[in-house]
Image (tube, rainbow, N blue to C red):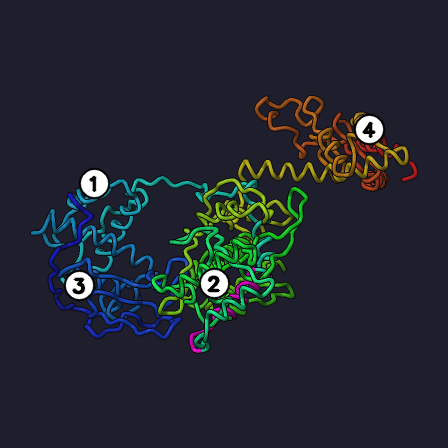
Amino acid sequence: MSVERGYSAERVKPFASDHWAGDTPVLADHRLEHDYPIPRFGDEDRWDLGALGWNPAAGRHSAVLLFTSFSGDWNLRARELAIALLNPVHPVLRGQLIYLRATPAHVKTIRSKLEGLKRFAAWHAETLPDIQLRQLHQVHLDRFLADIKAMGIRSRTRQAVDALRDLHTYAAVLTGGGLRFRPWGEITTIALSGQKSSTELSTPVIPPDVWWPLLRACWQYIDVFSHDIFAAGAEWSALDRPNNERVKVQRPEEVLARWIETPGNRVPLHRMTYGRFREGEIHWTLLSLLVSDGHSKQLFAELDRPDVVRRRRNITDAIATGMLSTAPGGLATQATAIERADGSVGPWIDGFDPATIRVQLKLLRNACYVFCAALTMMRDSELLSIKKGALTTSYGAPAVTSQLRKGRRGMQRRNWWIIEPVAQAIAVAERVALGDDVFSSVRREHRAEDGAGRFDRHSELKQFISQLNGQSPDAGLEPIPAFHLAPHMFRRTMAVITAQQPDGEIALGIQLKHAARRAVANGTTSGYASETPEWAAEFEHELQEAVASRLVGAWSSQKDHEMRLAGAGAQRFRDDLEKADSVSSNEVKVGDERTLRTLLRDRFSTLRWGTVNHCLGIPDQAACLKGLPAEAAAGGVMPNRCQPTTCGNSVITEEHAPIWIAEERDLVAKLRDRKMAPHNREQLETELEDVRRITRKFTDA
């Protein structure tokens, strides 16, 4: 049976409600964000709840409830259910002894339930048209559940189950009554839908080989390219005069002749192929504005006129004879010279024309969005809620103010800490934006009636990487591997990176605005920050780079004087440094510190830099792996089981010496206690002997 069709192709006039007057406002005791008209219960087709505000990530339409798919008594039932969900403490509900949670349902939730109710209404009209709602039994609903589950879309099953259960919950305020029993008893909606719960997040993490070149490209646009894009935009705005400032061009043939004879003038060429225009063709409209000083776009239009044909011929003849040269784009703005990966230096773009400016402004807006999404960890809705002038400070640090929307109602203004580059990105985005929203459309014709600009992030991000890769090699941007970007991925990826830092989980709890149950961090924060294999490898590489940088210092100390070392792995550590020293004497192989760092990193690839000692990380001589099953030992050395005084991997340097000397003094002080039990004294004396085997290597430390 179909559960997709509307209730009836020919709508039936709904009955009057037994509980709600037609002029009853559908919003009572609500915090309103906007001064929009409040719909009335008698509005049978559409309730615009924009007064409550809406999530900008979902769009303006997300604040609208539609009843056009319902007919007759089902239209009335849908509206009664909607007004009850919107007003859970309304006197009508209290009068029928319905006492539920006082928080009104979110409009998104009501829209979902109406979708489920629509499918049940269609099924009921087709399958059981002669059985009233209050006469239905569980067996009937089981048939409906089987039909809707056959569609294979679990979300639709959940919508329908939730709607049917509300027909029982709010039966007392539904005209004609609702279901007399709770459908499917206490079985959860998730279980009924067949969906399996999982503790793993489904949000993908952007791989490191995409993340880093993407952020570098965005920053290049924000910090370098933006100045040229804005300058070209300002030049074009000044040239493209408003109609009320234009005057008729007198004697256009003479004006054109003077322009052709003026040294330095160049004929603009289209930089891109779009519509009926082709890359490399003369940009006649822009040329007309250049010749007329912005007063006319028509000097070379209307090809059915002989004088226009003659003007075009004059231009092409001047180009052919060398009197005029051509220029891609044609505007006078010169692009900034940059240093490219191959070492060459030159402008990042060969010119600007109006179409290029539009494309580059969009890329700049997208770069600002990606950069801010990545480095603020704000949700898509929170980014889209940033208004101009939102930059501020919080506890002395730079911050941006926006609206916290998820799980909140009303105006929940919050601050997000940011770094200076993010503040710069927001400032650039403010210049690009045409309305009050920082992230919106960059074209005036895309402004909606309510002033909101259409910015389809999903569509823009889908093509953003390919657009960056499609820029000329002159731009000097690194190639970025193909990857499907989505707004929620940036927040998750940055959480993975931040969690690797000291106290990162606590910082994430604050920045992500996750509800706190223990200190500031909670289970949600931990799961959100769980790393992927790609990022685990990236963090391992960063750790090796950090170790290699420190090894350069150790190598220098080895060359300057005899380095004092202790521990069972000391000699091996010294031998490897000496081998690096012998290789470094070959000037062909080692030319700078970076090459030396790479050499040391490769030779000490398993080294772990520690506070008490260093670990060479060689499994065969690791005391921490002795006696463990092969499966456990396969994971490598275990720092929490380290035995620094006896392990063959342990290396103790002068940097660690103060800690060991302090430990020796502490043990000596404890052994002065004459009341100590013999077995405790024996244990401490053994520990002291082990420690002294280390400290005697640093006699003057």
Q: Nearer the viewer, mark 4 or mark 2?
A: 2
Q: Nearer the viewer, mark 4 or mark 1?
A: 4
Percent x, y for residue 233?
A: 52, 64
Q: Which badge, 4 or 2, comes first in the chain's sequence? A: 2
Three-letter amino acid code at the position of disc 3: Leu
Percent x, y for residue 122?
A: 16, 51
Residue in the picture at 44% in, 47% down: 462
Marker disc for residue 76: 3
| Secondary structure of residue under mark 3 | helix
Which quadrant of the figure contains the C terminus?
top right
Three-letter amino acid code at the position of disc 1: Ala
Residue in the picture at 38% in, 58% down: 58
Q: Which badge, 4 or 1, comes first in the chain's sequence? A: 1
Q: Nearer the viewer, mark 4 or mark 3?
A: 4
Q: Which badge, 4 or 3, comes first in the chain's sequence? A: 3
Three-letter amino acid code at the position of disc 2: Leu
Residue bearing mark 1: 146
Q: CA distance from mark 4 to mark 3?
A: 88 Å
Mark 3 in CB contact with mark 1 (< 8 angstroms): no
Percent x, y for residue 405?
A: 44, 61
Q: CA distance from mark 3 to mark 2?
A: 59 Å
Mark 4 surroundings: few (<14), some (14-19) or many (≥20) residues within 10 A = few
Is residue 179 visible from the viewing direction of this image? yes
Residue bearing mark 4: 586
Q: Nearer the viewer, mark 3 or mark 2?
A: 2
Q: Which residues are magenta?
A: 229-244
Residue bearing mark 2: 286
Residue in the picture at 87% in, 34% down: 559
